Image (cartoon, rainbow, N blue to C red):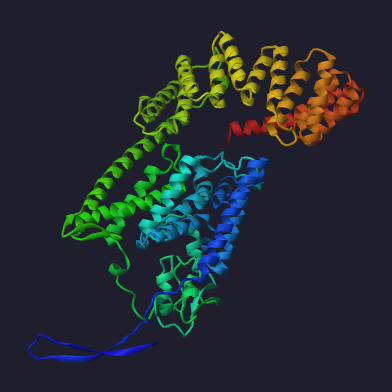
C-alpha cells in the first residue's frame, strides 16, 4: 500500500507539559474510480430481459394463447392450490442457482431492478446521486412478505385448516404452463404507472439505488438468506490496497472494501453480483470465485465493526417505532380499494417510513438534510422542512382514512360470507326467506358496504375503482332479503354508468326473473343482447331459461344468434366452440323436425372433431342419433361417452337402455348393474359426508 508517516503533535493542556507521538496512517490513492466495464454489459442483459417480456406479451396479444407468466408470484398458486406454474418453476430454479452463484438473478435477470437502475442513471444525468438508507429492522420486511406469500398458505393447510376447515382437501397436483388469460394476475395501467413511479424513482431517490430490492421485494426475502450459503461470491487477493473504489461504485449499498478486509470476501446478502466492484478495482484484486467457505461460516472480523450509531440511520428506539408504523401502513394500504397489490403495498410502506422518519427528525434535530436539501437549520425548519411536515401530516391522514376503509371492507366481507343461500332459492317468485341471523348479517353487510362506497354514493370512500364490486354485492344481499326493487335500482344505475358489463346484465336478468311477471325479464334479455350481442354468458342463461319455459323455437333462434355473433374459429376460439355446442344441444333437445335433429348431429360431430374427449358431447351425439332412430350409431356414441366418463351412472344407464332397445339384453343388464353400483357408492359417500363420526 502506498503510505507514509505523518508527524502529529498532540499537545495536552495538563500541568505535565506536552506530549508528542508519531502515528502511521495510510495514504490512499488519489482520483475517482474508473467507469465499470460491467455496467453496460449488465444493462444490455436487462434490456434483453425486458424485450423478451414485451415479445411475450405481444405474442399472447396476437395469438390469444402463450406460456404462462414467468413471474415468481405465480408460485403462490402452487403452494395454495397445487397448480404448478411456469413462475413456480422459474422461482425454484432461481433459488437453487443462488446456492451456487449467489444472488446473481436479482442483478442480471429482474425487470424491477432494471427499472431502478434506469432511474438511478436518469437521476445521475440531473446531478442527483441517491444515498443509501440504512435500517436494521426494515431489512426483515422482504423475508416477512416472502413467508406470508409462500409459506403461510402451507402452514394454514397443515396446522390450522384441520381444525377450522376439516373439509378443505389437499389439492391434486396440476399443471398450468400455457394460458389464454395471460393478464389475469396483473394490475391495470392505473396501478402499473404509480407502481413503477413509487418503486422506481421514489424508492431509489429516498432509499438508494436498489432501495426497493433491499427493503421491499418479497422474492429478495428468500434470495438474501440463501445467498449466505452460496459457494460463489466476490473474493479478494493480497493485492487489495483498501482504496474504497469498490464501495464507491457498488449500487447495492454494500461496503465492499470493509467486507473483503474483514472476511476475505463479500458476505453481505445484499450483494447482487453486479460485478461492478470487480471491474473498477485498480489492482484487479477482486474476483468472482467458488469455495466451500461461505458467508454462513466465516469468522468474525479481527477489527471490531463500527458502532451501531455510525452504521445505521435510525436509533434502536426509532427502529422499533417505525417498524410498527411500517406494519400499520402495510395493513392500511394492502388491497386498498381493491387495486393495491402486495408488491405495490411494500413499496408504499418503505417510502412512507423514510418520509415520516425525516419529518420526525425535523422536529427532533437542529440540523437536518435530505440529500442536498436542507430541511432544518439551527433548530428551525426551512421552507422545504415545512413542506415535508405538511406532506407527512396529510399522508398520515390519508393512510388513516385508507386503513378505516380497509377495515370496513373486511367487516363487510366477513358478514357477507355468512350469508349463504342458493341462487335457485333466491331468484324465484316463491323463493325462501333467509333465517333471522342470516338476514341480520345481510343488513349489516349492506350498511358496511354502503359506508365503504365512494363519496356521492352514500359512503366515505375517496376512489371508486371497487364500486362496481360493491354494487354487485349490494344487489345480491338485497335480493337475499327479497328487496328486489332496491337490487334492480342498484343494477340499473351501474348499467347506465358503464353499459356492457356482462356480470351486471346477468344479475339484472336474475333479479327480474324473480318477479311473478316474466315479461320484464324477457324484455331485458332481448334489449341487452341486441345492444351487446357478444355477451355469451347472458345468452346462455337466456337460452336455458327459454328451454325451461318450453319455448324451443325461441331457444333455437337465440342459440343461432349466439353462433352468428360468436365470431372466431371454433378450433382456436373457446367462445365460438361453446356457441356451436349450445346450438347443437338445443337443436337436438328442443328441435321438432328430423331436419333440426340432423343439423344438431352435424354440429356436435364438428365439435367432437375439435374436442374428442368431451364425454357429454358424445352423449349429445347419441341423443341426436336416437331422435333420428339410428340406434346402432347412438350405442356407439354412448359407449364412447362411458369410456371417457366411466364413473357417470347416468351415462351407463342410458347406454343400458339403448343396448336393450337393440336386443342386447345381457350387455344391457351388465351396464344397468354397473350404474346401480355407482349410484349406491355415491349415496354411501354422501351419507358419510353428511354424518361424520
Q: Position of residue 13 (x, y in %)?
A: 10, 85
Residue positioned most to the left: 15
Q: Position of residue 237 (x, y in %)?
A: 49, 83
Q: Seen in the image, is 301 located left or right of residue 172?
A: left
Q: Is residue 434 visible?
A: no
In the rendered view of the protein, which quadrant contains the C terminus?
top right
Q: Where is 278 relative to 550, above or below?
A: below
- Nearer to us in this view, 492 or 116: 116
Among the 4 quarters of the image, the one containing residue 166 = top right
- Nearer to us in this view, 417 or 127: 127
Q: Is residue 597 visible?
A: yes
Residue positioned most to the right: 663
Q: Seen in the image, is 368 located left or right of residue 76?
A: left
Q: Seen in the image, is 113 located left or right of residue 440?
A: right
Among the 4 quarters of the image, the one containing residue 309 = bottom left
Residue at x 58% of width, y 20% of height: 424
Q: Position of residue 610 (x, y in %)?
A: 78, 35
Q: Position of residue 365 (x, y in %)?
A: 20, 59
Q: Seen in the image, is 213 located left or right of residue 537?
A: left
Amino acid at each position: 500500500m502506498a503510505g507514509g508517516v505523518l508527524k502529529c503533535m498532540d499537545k495536552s493542556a495538563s500541568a505535565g507539559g506536552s506530549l508528542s507521538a508519531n502515528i502511521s496512517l495510510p495514504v490512499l490513492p488519489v482520483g475517482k474510480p474508473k467507469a465499470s466495464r460491467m455496467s453496460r454489459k449488465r444493462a444490455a442483459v436487462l434490456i434483453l430481459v425486458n424485450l423478451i417480456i414485451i415479445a411475450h406479451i405481444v405474442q399472447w396479444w396476437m395469438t390469444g394463447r402463450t406460456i404462462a407468466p414467468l413471474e415468481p408470484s405465480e408460485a403462490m398458486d402452487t403452494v395454495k392450490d397445487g397448480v404448478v406454474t411456469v413462475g413456480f418453476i422459474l422461482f425454484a430454479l432461481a433459488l437453487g442457482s443462488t446456492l451456487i452463484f449467489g444472488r446473481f438473478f436479482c442483478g442480471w435477470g429482474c425487470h424491477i431492478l432494471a427499472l431502478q437502475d434506469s432511474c438511478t442513471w436518469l437521476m445521475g444525468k440531473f446531478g442527483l446521486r441517491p444515498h443509501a438508507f440504512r435500517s436494521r429492522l426494515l431489512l426483515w420486511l422482504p423475508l416477512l412478505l416472502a413467508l406470508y406469500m409462500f409459506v403461510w398458505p402451507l402452514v394454514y393447510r397443515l396446522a390450522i385448516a384441520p381444525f377450522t376447515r376439516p373439509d378443505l382437501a389437499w389439492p391434486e397436483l396440476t399443471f398450468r404452463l400455457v394460458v389464454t388469460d395471460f393478464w389475469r394476475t396483473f394490475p391495470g395501467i392505473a396501478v402499473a404507472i404509480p407502481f413503477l413511479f413509487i418503486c422506481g424513482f421514489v424508492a431509489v431517490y429516498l432509499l438508494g439505488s436498489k432501495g426497493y430490492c433491499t427493503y421491499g421485494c418479497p422474492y429478495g426475502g428468500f434470495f438474501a438468506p440463501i445467498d449466505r450459503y452460496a459457494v460463489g461470491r466476490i473474493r479478494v487477493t493480497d493485492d487489495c490496497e483498501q482504496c474504497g473504489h469498490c464501495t464507491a461504485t457498488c449500487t447495492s449499498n454494500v461496503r465492499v472494501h470493509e467486507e473483503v478486509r474483514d472476511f476475505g470476501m463479500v458476505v453481505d446478502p445484499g450483494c447482487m453480483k453486479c460485478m461492478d466492484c470487480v471491474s473498477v478495482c485498480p489492482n484487479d484484486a477482486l474476483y468472482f470465485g467458488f469455495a466451500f467457505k461461505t458467508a454462513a461460516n466465516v469468522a468474525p472480523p479481527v477489527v471490531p465493526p463500527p458502532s451501531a450509531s455510525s452504521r445505521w440511520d435510525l436509533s434502536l428506539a426509532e427502529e422499533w417505532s417505525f417498524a410498527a408504523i411500517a406494519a400499520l401502513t402495510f395493513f392500511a394500504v394492502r388491497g386498498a380499494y381493491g387495486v393495491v397489490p402486495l408488491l405495490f403495498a411494500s413499496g408504499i410502506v418503505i417510502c412512507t417510513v423514510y418520509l415520516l422518519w425525516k419529518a420526525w427528525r425535523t422536529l427532533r434535530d437542529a440540523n437536518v438534510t435530505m440529500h442536498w436539501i436542507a430541511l432544518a437549520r439551527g433548530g428551525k425548519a426551512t421552507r422545504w422542512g415545512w413542506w415535508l411536515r405538511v406532506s407527512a401530516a396529510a399522508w398520515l391522514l390519508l393512510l388513516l382514512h385508507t386503513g378505516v376503509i380497509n377495515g370496513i371492507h373486511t367487516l363487510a366481507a366477513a358478514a357477507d360470507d355468512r350469508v349463504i343461500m342458493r341462487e335457485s332459492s333466491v331468484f324465484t317468485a316463491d323463493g325462501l326467506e333467509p333465517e333471522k341471523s342470516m338476514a341480520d348479517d345481510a343488513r349489516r353487510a349492506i350498511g358496511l358496504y354502503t359506508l365503504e362506497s365512494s363519496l356521492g354514493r352514500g359512503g366515505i370512500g375517496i376512489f371508486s375503482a371497487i364500486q362496481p364490486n360493491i354494487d354487485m354485492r349490494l344487489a345480491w344481499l338485497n335480493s337475499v332479503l327479497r328487496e328486489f326493487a332496491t337490487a334492480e335500482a342498484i343494477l340499473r344505475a351501474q348499467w347506465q354508468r358503464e353499459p356492457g358489463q356482462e356480470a351486471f346484465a346477468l344479475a339484472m336478468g336474475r333479479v327480474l326473473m324473480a318477479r311473478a311477471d316474466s315479461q320484464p325479464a324477457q324484455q331485458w334479455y332481448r334489449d341487452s343482447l341486441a345492444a351487446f350481442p357478444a355477451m355469451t354468458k347472458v345468452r346462455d342463461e337466456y337460452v336455458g331459461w327459454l328451454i325451461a319455459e318450453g319455448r324451443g323455437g325461441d331457444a333455437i333462434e337465440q342459440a343461432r344468434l349466439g353462433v352468428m355473433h360468436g365470431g372466431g374459429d371454433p378450433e382456436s376460439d373457446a367462445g365460438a366452440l361453446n356457441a356451436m355446442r349450445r346450438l347443437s344441444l338445443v337443436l337436438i333437445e328442443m328441435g321438432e323436425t328430423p331436419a333440426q335433429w340432423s343439423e344438431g348431429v352435424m354440429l356436435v360431430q364438428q365439435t367432437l372433431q375439435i374436442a374428442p374427449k368431451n364425454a357429454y358431447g358424445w352423449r349429445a351425439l347419441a341423443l341426436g342419433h336416437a331422435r333420428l332412430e339410428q340406434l346402432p350409431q347412438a350405442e356407439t356414441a354412448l359407449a364412447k361417452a362411458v369410456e371417457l366418463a366411466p364413473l357417470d351412472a347416468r351415462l351407463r344407464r342410458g347406454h343400458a337402455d339403448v343396448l336393450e332397445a337393440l336386443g342386447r339384453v345381457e350387455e344391457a343388464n351388465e351396464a344397468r348393474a354397473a350404474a346401480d353400483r355407482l349410484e349406491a357408492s355415491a349415496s354411501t359417500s354422501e351419507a358419510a359426508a353428511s354424518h361424520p363420526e
